[in-house]
Amino acid sequence: MKKKKIGIIGVSGFAKNHLNSIKYLENECELVAADVRREDRCEADVDAVKALGAKIYEDAYEMLEEEKNNIDIICIPTSIDSHSDYSVAAMKLGYDVICEKPVTGTIEEALLMKKTADETGRKLCVGFQNIFSPTIQKIKKNKVEKKLGDLISCKSYATWPRSSAYYKRNAWAGKLIYNGKQIFDSPIQNATAHYLNNLLYIAGETYDESAIPEEIYGENFRAKNIESADTQFVRIKTKNNIKLTYIVTHSCKEDFGPVAEYLFENGKILWDFQHETDGEAKVFEKTGSEYKLIDKFDNGSISTHALVFKNMFEAIDNNKQPLSNINNAYQHIISVNKSFDSSNGITQIDEKYLDALRVEAEAYDPDLDVSNERNIVIKGIEKTIEKMYEQEKSFIEIGAEWACCSLPR
């Protein structure tokens, strides 16, 4: 296989995961050029890409023009608002693209990206790396082959605390609109987007497809001092009549999950992804009303970030679509947009239901400065979500006082 030549737009923040994957796969690819954008330039970033042998640019569009006959793949680990513009420009100039998740902020932009990929024949991979994990792939195989019968429903939840430092790490964190574009930055759109996407992917009819949302109900709440939501519930009925339930909050004390349950006619699969290197799935067969454990497997130590790149290389060499493609990512952005539509935006939670806790370290990045920062939490949110998950009810349906007393409708 010929080594793939790669260019990257932006090298700070999450881009470091892209750079690590390129370095990890050095026998299969090489970094040729990097746009070290003026707004987030630092010498450490410049040194990192120079060490990989890349030519440095300070303008993405200049790089795309200059390198169009030299580079195979453009990586776009930039802010959500820029995903569509950069992806469309790159594909029109003949590049295949790996765009970081979420695909973009709106359905309209995602449709433009899909249209451009179709018209140019370029491959557009979206960085939902979690669907490449061995556990998710085995669950998908189980679903498609109906080893436990038809899939009836899927549900998942996570409580991931995020402090005020998390929302100060860049200019767009926690925003609904940035640079004049809707981005809906929130747990289901960003930090825990993978786990909503997992539900959609597993529920898809074939190995390569995500399920198509037909009905979407959402609840979006805000406890923190941000524009967007930090506490969310989504219920989806898919076109193939599977019910999906997803619950998440950043306004919590306890760092837990995600966990998920996939319920089939003749059994269920419980998925636990507490740590990326040892995520575990347990398969249960149903006999009468009893469930018997028949299989167990985990992810081992494989890098799912690198698997995104490997899958893209294979897609190019075999002239097929990457697994995490624009068609699948489109179902995720529909779910996000329609969830916000369903809830008429975001509801602010009354302060009497909140606590402001001191922060020892930011869970997302322990290197962030948390001096004088706080984690705003909803009192008792962990127990509330556990109950919601068990009963598959929303914040309002379960009777959470803070949710029911401040309805936007």
Image (spheres, helix red, strand yellow):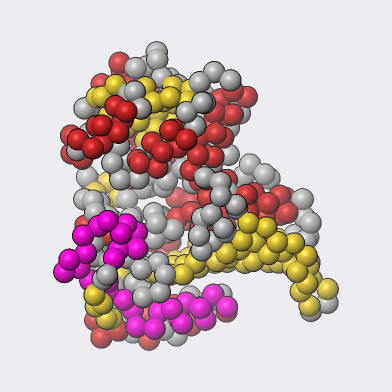
Indicate the quadrant where residue 273 lies.
Answer: bottom right
Q: Residue 48 versus residue 72: which sits nearer the camera? A: 48
Task: Tell which residue pokes out farthest to the right in this image.
Answer: 287
Q: Is residue 377 magenta?
A: yes
Which residue does the image show at 47% across and 35% down from the upper left?
24
Q: Quadrant of the C terminus?
A: bottom left
Where residue 370 appears, as percent x and y from the top left, is 21, 64
Q: Identify the image quadrant of residue 19.
A: top left
- Could you say where residue 123 lies in the image, as x and y percent from the top left? 50, 29
Q: Position of residue 3 (x, y in %)?
A: 50, 20
Relative image position of residue 357 (x, y in whole percent): 26, 77
Residue depicted at 50% across the width and 39% down the height: 306
Looking at the rendered structure, the number of numbered marks drawn on it comes to 0
Residue ID at (26%, 36%) = 45
Q: Is residue 191 visible?
A: yes
Q: Is residue 340 left or right of residue 119?
A: left
Say if the magenta span includes residue 170. no
Would you identify the image quadrant in which residue 227 lies? bottom left
Q: Is residue 88 visible?
A: no
